[in-house]
Image (cartoon, rainbow, N blue to C red):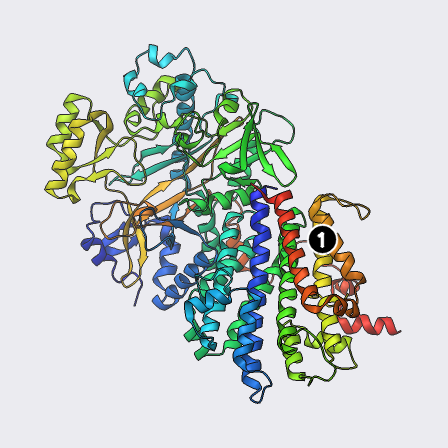
Amino acid sequence: MSLFAAYNDGLVRGGYQGAYDEMFADPANLTPRPHYKALYERLATMSPEEFRRRVAAADATLMNQGITFTVYGDAAGVERTFPVDLIPRIVPADEWDLVERGLTQRIRALNLFLADLYREDCQIRKDRVLPFDLIESAVHYRRAFVGCPVPHNLFVHICGTDLIRDARGNWCVLEDNLRTPSGVSYVLENRQILARIFPQVFAAHPVRPVDHYTTCLLDNLRALSPRPYNPVVVLLTPGIYNSAYFEHAFLAQQMGIELVQGTDLYVDADVVYMKTTHGAQRVDVIYRRIDDDFLDPEVFRSDSVLGIPGLMRAYAAGNVALANAVGTGVADDKVVYRYIPDIIRYYLKEDPILPNVETYCAWEEAEQDHILANIERLVVKAANESGGYGMLIGPQATREECAAFAEKVKATPRNYLAQPVVDLSATPCYIEGQGIVPRRVDLRPYILSGPSGVTIIPGGLTRVALRESSYVVNSSQGGGSKDTWVLSRPVAGGRRRAAMTVSAAPAPTSPAPAVKSHQSQGQWQSQSQVQSGMKS
Amino acid sequence: MLSREADSLFWIGRYLERAEATSRLVDVQYHAALESPASLNDPTSLWTSILEISEDELIYKARYGEVEESNIIRFLVFDPDQPNSVVSCVRAARQNAQGVREILSSEMWETINRSFLELMKWDAERMLAGSPHEFLVGIRNRCHLFYGLAERTMLIGDAYYFLKAGVYLERADQMARLTEVLVRELTGGDFVLDENEVFDTHGWIACLKSASAFEAFRKTYRGGITPDNVLSFLTLDWEYPSSIHHAVSMLERCLRSISGSSGRRYANDAEKLAGKLHAELSFCTVADMHAAGLHTFLENIQVRCAEIGTAITDRYLRH
C-alpha cells in the first residue's frame, strides 16, 4: 500500500482543498510539481514499514540528543521533542530568489527605520508616514534609548520573518520577529537528521547548505565589539528552564562562545565582566536571548532575576554591544507591521517585493467597525503577544469567544488588529496511523545583518500545524517542523552529488598511478608485523 | 571559564563517580550475599555497613524501617528522594550537564542524557526480576563511556580538569568510606586486626571486588590475600588507579593544571591541602596506619577530602 493512499481523504477531511499544495500541482490526482517529482516517486514506492522505521530512528535521535523544548504551564510534560516531519519541503531556486530579495529589502528598511526612530532628529516622524502616537504607545518602544549610540547603526542583527503562501502560492509576510527569534537550531539539526535518515534522497537533490549560519553569526557579533582586538562574545540565556534553552546551548557550542546566565555577569564602572575561575573577564558583545524587560533590573523590570544590574549603563556608555539592540520590538509590533510597506517605500524608494497580509487596525474607526462586523471570519491578534498566545481564530471560535474578544477590541483598540484567514499552504506530512496527509505550513527564514551586509541561509524553519485542519504552527501549540531544501540552480556539468554517488568505481582522473610501488605506504600496519619487525 | 560552569563540571564528576561506586558496591554485595550461603557474616549486617558508607542509615530506617535487601537496593539505587541514590546522582549530573551543554562535547551530553532517560524506565522490581548484575554493570559502563568520551572529545583545559578533579576527589572519598566499612565488617567492629582472629578470605575478596580491585591486587601481591596487603593496596598503592593515594595524586595534578603552578610551590589552599594529603599518603605504610588506628586513619582521610572540596569551592566555584 502506498504511503499516499490516504492523501485525498485527508485533503477533504481537513479542509485543505482551498490551500496551495506545495508538492502537488493537482492534489486529487497526486500529480507532483516538477521540483517534487523525484521525492514523490521515492516516497510513493517506499513501504509504510520502511518509512516508519526511519521515523522511529529520527525520534530516538531527537530524544537522546535532548533536542527538546519546555512547554509553559504544562505540568505533565516538562520536556518535549519538537517533532520533525521527515518529508522535506522543497523550494526551487527561482522562488527562493524572490524570497531572498524581498527579505533583504525588508530588513534593510527595518534597520533604517529603527536607526531613525532612535535618533534625536527622527525624520519619519516629521514626514508623517505613520501616526507617531502608535510608536510612542508601543510597549517595546524605548524612549530612554533615543540618542544612544549603536555600532554600525544596526539594530537588528538576527531577524526571523514568518512567511506564508496564499491560495495561489504567492509568498507574503505574516510577521517579523525582531527581538529574540528562535528556531534556527532546529534548521541546523533537521538538516543533519534528514541527511542521516534519507541519505539517498538527499543525494539526489542539489540542496543548498545551511551550516554557515553560526560562522556568519559569530563574524557579525564580533564586528560589534567596542574593543577591536580579540573581543569576548557571550550568549546570555535565562537558563535551563527556558523553552529555547537547547537552542541557546547549541548556538554557544557551535560558535565556541560562553553560555552565560545573568548571575555570571556583573557591571563595574560601566563595564561588563563575567565571573570566571581565573577572576573577572571583560565582556564585549552579548548575544542576548532575554527580552529587553528582563535585561537590567535597574532600568526595566525590577523583579527580574535574569538580568544584570547596570547593564544598561554599560550599554549606553558604548562599553558593551547587545544583539539585538535594545528597543527593536517597536518595529515588530503587530500594529506597526501594517505600515512596513510604507516604511519600505519611504526609506528605500522601492516597492515592497514581498507583500504583507491584508490587515485591519482596530484604532482606525472604519476598520474597527469592519473587524467587529466580521469577527467570525477574521483572525484577531493582540499586538504584543507571540507564540500563538492571545489570538482569536474567528472561524474556529464559538460565538461566546468571539463576543468576548470583541469586547476586548473595543476596550483597547490600540492593542488589536485583524487579518482575514489566510489559507496557509499545505504540504504532505507523515501522521502516525494515517500515512501521508496534507498539513499547513509556514516558513521562518533567518536573516543576519552585519556591517558587511545581509545574509540569509537558504531556507529556514518550515513549521507545520500537525493537528488536522489547524492553522497554528507554533511549537508550544502542537506544531512540528520540516527540513527546508532550497535547490541550487542547475549548473552546467550536471548534478553535483548524485553524479558522485552513481559511479560505483570512479575512473581515475589523473594517469593511473604506479600502484605497486606505493602499496606499502597505503597499507595499515598490523600488530604482528610490528612485532616481527622488532624481532628481526 | 565561568565559575558556575566550573562548579557544574566538578559536580558532574563527583555525581557520576558516586553513582559508579554505589552501583558497583550494590552489585558486589548482592552477589556476595548470594554466593556465600555459609557466610561468616549475616547478610543483613553487610547491608547495614553499606548504608553507613553513605551515612544515610538514619534516613533509611525512618523511611523503610527494618534492614531488608530489596528495600536497601531500592534506597541505594532507585529512591528519587535519597540524594545519594544512583538515580539521584545521575539526575543531578544530567541537570548540571544541561547547564554546561555547550562545554561538553555533543557525545558526552548525549551519553549522560541517554543514561538518565534509560534509567527512568527502571525500578527495583524490574531490576530484581531480571539480572541485577547486568543492570548495575550497565550503569557503570555508562559512566565509563562518559569518562572515555571526555578523554577523547574534550579540550584538555580548565573544563576537563574541573571535571576530573570532581571524579578524583569523589573517588578518594568513596574509597576511604568503602575501606572503612569493609574493615569494620571484617574485624567484627573493632578495627583491630588480631592475628588469632579467623581470617575471612571470602570477605576480603568481596572487599577487593567491590573496589574493582581483585584482579589488579592478584597481579600486585602474588603472595596472597592478607588484610595488610589489601589495606595497603586500596589506600596506598602507587599503581592501582583507584587507590586513595593515586586518586589524591591525580586530584593534585588537576588542581595544578588549573592554576598553572609549578611543582615547587602551591598556588592556593586547595592545592596546598591536596598536596599535603598526597605527600602523607606517599610516605605512609600499613604500620603507620595501624599505629594511628585504622578507624581514625580512614575517618581522617574523609575529613581531609571534605576540606579540599571546600577549598576548591572557595577558590574557584563560587558564583
Locate residue A440, reporting x and y percent.
Answer: 28, 47
Identify the residue at horizontal 39%, vertical 33% (top origin): A303
Q: Residue A148 versus residue A488: which sits nearer the camera? A: A148
State the residue lying farthest toward the front: B190
In the rendered image of this protein, does residue B13 appear above or below residue B68? Answer: above
Q: Quadrant of residue B319?
A: top right
In the rendered image of this protein, does residue A252 appear above or below residue A224? Answer: below
Q: Quadrant of residue A375?
A: top left
Quarter holding the N terminus of chain A? bottom left
Residue of label 1: B274
State the residue lying farthest toward the bottom: B38
Decide if residue A524 is in sight here: no
In the rendered image of this protein, does residue B58 appear above or below residue B30? Answer: above
Locate residue A322, reporting x and y percent.
Answer: 49, 29
Under circle 1, the secondary element is helix
Locate residue A513, reporting x and y percent.
Answer: 74, 59
Position of A443 with respect to A154 (left or right) is left
Locate residue A426, reporting x and y percent.
Answer: 28, 48
Position of B96 with respect to B161 (left or right) is left
Quarter holding the C terminus of chain A? bottom right
Decide if residue A132 is in sight here: yes
